[in-house]
Image (tube, rainbow, N blue to C red):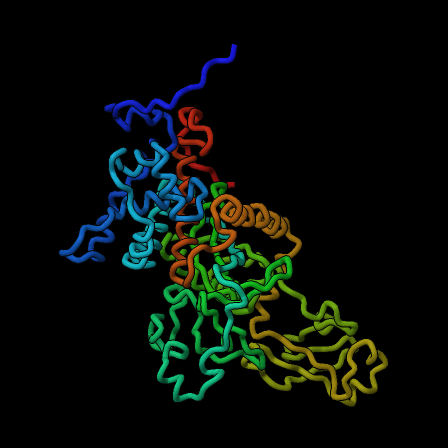
Amino acid sequence: MLGPVKPRHLGPPVAVSLDALVPRNHFYRPLDARLDLAFVRDWVSTSYPDRGRPSIDPIVFFKLSLVMFFEGIRSERQLLALAADRLSVRWYLGYGLDEALPDAAGFTRIRQRLGLAVFRRFFAHVVDLCQDAGLVWGEEVLADATRVPGNAATGSLVPRLREVVDGHLVALFAGDAAPDGADGATRDGPGRWNLLEACRLDQHRPPSGPYRRLSARKVSRTDPDAAAMSMRDGRTVLGYQDHYLVDGGKARVILHCLVTPGDVAENQVLLDQLRRTLFRRKLRPKRLVADAKYATGENIRALEEQGIRAYVPLPEWDKSSPYYHNAACAYDAAEDVYRCPQGQALKLKWIDEAGGRTIDRARAASCNSCPVKSECTKSNQGRLVSRSVHAEYLDRVRGYRGTAAYEKALRKRNVWVEPVFAEAKQWHGLGRFRLRGLVNVNIEALLVATGQNRKRWLRATGWGRRGVPGAAAAVPAAACPAP
């Protein structure tokens, strides 16, 4: 028999404890017990004045950031709406049923007040927890970067001020062409740009060669820090590069996270990231694994001089040439000359300091009378061969190619680093930045990377996976072993 319609009966208020309404095995209970955020108040105490209206508890802000990460929420207003309806979230934040939750506008003010340094410190603290739990192997480091579209459209690009007016007006509006350090960036020592603090390369550095960067001519009205970049599907978007250093252990702990404008290449930030990480973590890795985009002579030399094997594929620029490759010309170390396949010597012609290479050329008469000239060069001035000033270290890296350890490391990179980015994009909202500005997107990326490390730490210390809280008691509190 069909029952009667259930009437809405709210009744009088009922005295009930919020703690009794949240299940004992709920995810947020062990999270609150294991991750004590009381240290945050000590970090931010100097950011607040002694007088004025009391602020939101910064611990609540970081807890809300955790909830946003674990629940996969993209909007702060949606986050507060969830907190208003979800009893477990209210319990985790420490807000009773009759207490008003913080306002969404307060998130922006808190981010501006705390600054990027506090979020970097928070990220480093979680990496410390992972390292103390034995999750950081330290024998191997993997580097990679991914392109993340920003919250701006290409239609917002307009010419920079200096492109349409004279230098006098540019000087009046210094924000478009500020002198060194005037835009908030810092220099580490005399003349050295502090990349990790500024999160960008020197904005006023001269171009390398005839190519002019688009960001030097145009700027977005919506997000001035976002730069034009090409995605894999062929789209041109405004966005950023998110750079990760990942430990080679099974836990895949993210050791460093840095976001730069989209026109900053991966290889330009590697050494700064690596030096900071190795010094901070007291690590001495045996090898660094990366793709061919990192294979610059400066990077290879710096790694090899530190005793770190550079497992990086080297690009072969003359591979598609119909003529003899440079490798066909043997280097005679005793006489410091190259010899072509016919035995003719190529003498040093000039040194390209900007490109970091030497140019050797054969005698024109010898080349023009050579029986295999058509297979070697079309020039009537003699065959040219360029040699990098870092050739000794590049040859050493070429010697790694084909070894079992080298091939294993490159295969490992595909399943160690790429899934970490996929996890951040598909599950935790890093498919597109929701905030604007270089500082804000760094904060957003740091919170995502911190959440990823936090998941690994919780899993290793006994909690288990996010979706099966009942299995937490069966997971041993053991550290992840090395691979």
Q: Position of residue 242 (x, y in %)?
A: 48, 57
Q: Position of residue 20 (x, y in %)?
A: 29, 24
Q: How many marks?
A: 0
- Residue 292: name its quadrant: bottom right
Q: Position of residue 165 (x, y in %)?
A: 45, 86
Residue at image coords 65%, 77%: 386
Taking the image as shown, residue 229 lies to the left or right of residue 447, namely right
> Along the line of sight, which residue is nearer the eye, 327 or 159?
159
Residue at image coords 41%, 67%: 195
Residue at image coords 55%, 46%: 419
The answer to whether residue 267 of the structure is visible from this angle is no
Taking the image as shown, residue 255 lies to the left or right of residue 88, namely right
Residue at image coords 40%, 36%: 458
Compared to 130, does 298 lie above or below?
below
- Given the current orientation, which residue lies at the most extreme left position? 51
The answer to whether residue 58 of the structure is visible from this angle is yes
- Residue 381: name its quadrant: bottom right
- Residue 313: name its quadrant: bottom right
- Given the current orientation, which residue lies at the most extreme right position? 371
Q: Position of residue 276 (x, y in %)?
A: 39, 59
Taking the image as shown, residue 417 lies to the left or right of residue 378, namely left
Compared to 123, does 90 lie above or below?
above
